[in-house]
């Protein structure tokens, strides 16, 4: 059993992606035997939990970065970094453009997240903008399908343990919840590995669904906690698991019906949630950087 903090980067707002929009995720983690505390920020300045995360008894942080760039203070970023340095596991999930860009303050975990405001000026926006239906959303974004639908999970010959399941003939998790404009995560840093990719329904481009950090150490060689960076928090939102739960009023895209038509795919995806909690809990093992990047 793990002690998990399921945390958003905004204060309570029932018409936004606050923690009440992730109730099914919290229930799933609890049903797997984990002790889950689900909460929003208490206020805009240093949050009493996040700013002292490394001093508390949590073992994992599942951070839904649903803000527009100011979701973490400097003190909170420092505490999360210390939490990982002490062996704590961290999952982050953001979205398109600069949604969740507060993650940039989290060291290597911030570095694997690519945001509109932080990308090199030489980046070609045409390679990172797939949502042609909503002109208010800029790059990076990748159109993997409608909310309420599935998207195929693409892997190479190596299937990571996080994607293993005994519920499919292939032995792996084959579908993730879809979203019209997923964000960008990259493995162009030491100790980072692409877990799986999706494919844009608009352009056919491949993009990373999740990136892992494993084997990272502190300056003195102490193993750091494992981390996962998801391309979008919509992989875990209630609305993407069951559109009947509804979405904030600013969501204008029409939902799909794939989840309702074939709920078994969602049951398989829940194995991914359970795998994440187990993998983030596992004791990290230090390895030379050259091996981590091999």
Image: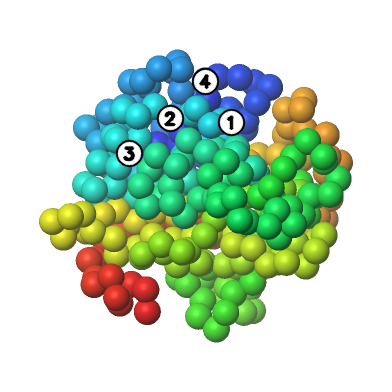
Left or right of 89 on screen, residue 26: right
Residue 111: image location, x then y, percent: 43, 51
Tag 3 residue: 80
Residue 20: image location, x then y, percent: 59, 28
Q: CA distance from mark 4 to mark 2?
A: 11 Å
**Earlier residue among tags 4 and 2:** 4
Mark 2 and mark 4 in contact (Cβ < 8 Å)?
no
Q: Residues within 10 Å of mark 2 (few under 14, many from 20)?
A: many
- The mark closer to the camera, 4 or 2, is 2
Q: Which mark is residue 72?
A: 2
Residue 170: image location, x then y, percent: 62, 79
Q: Residues within 10 Å of mark 3 (few under 14, many from 20)?
A: many
**Earlier residue among tags 4 and 3:** 4
Left or right of 262 on screen, residue 87: left
Q: Quadrant of residue 198?
A: bottom right
Tag 1 residue: 68
Q: Which mark is residue 11?
A: 4
Instruction: Identify the residue shown where x is 57% and y is 79%.
Output: 156
**Earlier residue among tags 1 and 4:** 4
Instruction: Identify the residue shown where x is 58% and y is 31%.
Output: 68
């Amino acid at each position: 059993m793990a002690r998990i903090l399921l945390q958003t980067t905004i204060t309570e707002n029932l018409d936004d992606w606050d923690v009440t929009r992730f109730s099914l995720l919290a229930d799933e983690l609890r049903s797997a035997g984990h002790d889950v505390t689900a909460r929003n920020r208490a206020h805009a300045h240093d949050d009493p939990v996040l700013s002292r995360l490394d001093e508390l008894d949590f073992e994992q942080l599942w951070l839904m970065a649903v803000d527009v760039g100011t979701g973490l203070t400097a003190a909170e970023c420092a505490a999360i970094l210390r939490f990982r340095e002490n062996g704590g596991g961290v999952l982050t999930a953001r979205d398109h453009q600069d949604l969740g860009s507060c993650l940039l303050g989290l060291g290597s975990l911030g570095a694997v997240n690519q945001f509109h405001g932080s990308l090199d000026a030489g980046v070609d926006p045409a390679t990172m903008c797939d949502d042609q239906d909503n002109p208010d959303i800029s790059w990076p974004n990748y159109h993997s399908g409608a909310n309420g639908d599935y998207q195929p999970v693409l892997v190479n010959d190596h299937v990571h343990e996080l994607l293993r399941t005994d519920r499919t003939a292939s032995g792996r998790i084959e579908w993730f919840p879809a979203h019209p404009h997923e964000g960008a995560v990259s493995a162009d840093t030491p100790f980072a590995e692409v877990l799986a990719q999706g494919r844009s329904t608009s352009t056919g481009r491949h993009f990373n669904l999740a990136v892992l950090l494993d084997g990272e150490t502190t300056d003195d060689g102490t193993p750091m906690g494992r981390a996962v960076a998801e391309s979008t928090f919509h992989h875990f939102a209630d609305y993407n698991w069951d559109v009947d739960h509804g979405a904030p009023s600013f969501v204008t895209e029409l939902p799909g019906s794939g989840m309702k038509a074939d709920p078994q795919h969602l049951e398989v995806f829940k194995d991914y949630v359970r795998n994440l909690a187990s993998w983030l809990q596992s004791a990290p093992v230090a390895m030379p950087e050259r091996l981590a990047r091999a």
